[in-house]
């Protein structure tokens, strides 16, 4: 026997239980990307870290020649130490900024701040606006140079604060102000 559409009759299809979600049902990306200048920020921060580490390796290489417990090939060529450090750390400095930019997103929808960050691992953060205690807008000196800012959101949760980095300064200022007003309104409504 078949139904009107020519399909064999049988039990109606059942939707999967909520516990068996597929990857298509996973968290959607928040609506807004951070500024494209955030890639420059992360690159500059990576270069500063690279220079610090290579400089430390170069200073250490000044003493490598006097350490008898090291292999002869290293004590004869102490310049290999900073070169090796640079070779290991340079690829992440180049790869990290575009990967972070592709992942870092944020959204303020309803009474929830939703942010996603990371580059090797991912972090999804949902902050109920009603739980917000303080909202701060900060700028490091690289951020100031690039016209960027970070919005730090502090709640009473065990996780402490959440932050959205790499925002245009104007967007960060507007977001911090909106969050402060919404949090105040929700606290006033609750009393």
Image (spheres, rainbow, N blue to C red):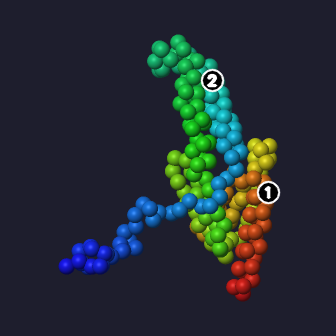
| Viewer-nearest residue: 117 or 62 | 117
Query: Which mark is drawn over residue 58?
Result: 2
Measure the alpha-carbon separation of dots 2 and 1: 41 Å
**Residue at 57 percent of width and 51 percent of height:** 103
Do we see residue 45 in this rendering? no
Q: Helix, strand or loop at disc 2?
A: helix
In the displayed structure, does residue 166 sit left or right of residue 169? left
- Residue marked by disc 1: 170
> Looking at the image, which residue is at 60% across and 61% down?
30
Report which quarter residue 175 is drawn in: bottom right
Q: Which residue is drawn at 78% across and 54% down?
A: 169
Q: Is residue 78 positioned above or below 24 on the image?
A: above
- Outermost residue on the left side: it is 1
Question: Picture coordinates of residue 90 (x, y %)?
Answer: 58, 31
Q: Residue 77 carries which label?
A: none
The answer to whether 63 is drawn above or below residue 16 in the figure is above
In which quadrant will I find the N terminus?
A: bottom left
């Amino acid at each position: 026997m078949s139904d009107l559409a020519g399909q064999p009759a049988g039990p109606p299809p059942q939707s999967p239980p909520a516990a068996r979600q597929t990857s298509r049902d996973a968290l959607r990306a928040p609506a807004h990307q951070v500024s494209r200048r955030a890639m420059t920020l992360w690159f500059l921060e990576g270069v500063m870290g690279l220079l610090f580490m290579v400089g430390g390796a170069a200073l250490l290489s000044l003493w490598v020649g006097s350490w008898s417990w090291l292999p002869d090939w290293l004590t004869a060529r102490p310049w290999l130490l900073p070169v090796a450090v640079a070779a290991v750390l340079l690829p992440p400095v180049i790869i990290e900024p575009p990967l972070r930019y592709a992942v870092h997103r944020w959204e303020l929808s309803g009474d929830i701040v939703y942010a996603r960050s990371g580059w090797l691992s991912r972090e999804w953060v949902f902050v109920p606006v009603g739980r917000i205690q303080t909202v701060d807008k900060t700028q490091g000196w690289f951020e100031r140079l690039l016209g960027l800012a970070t919005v730090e959101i502090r709640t009473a949760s065990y996780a402490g604060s959440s932050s959205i980095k790499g925002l245009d300064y104007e967007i960060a200022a507007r977001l911090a102000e909106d969050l402060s007003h919404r949090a105040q309104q929700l606290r006033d409504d609750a009393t």
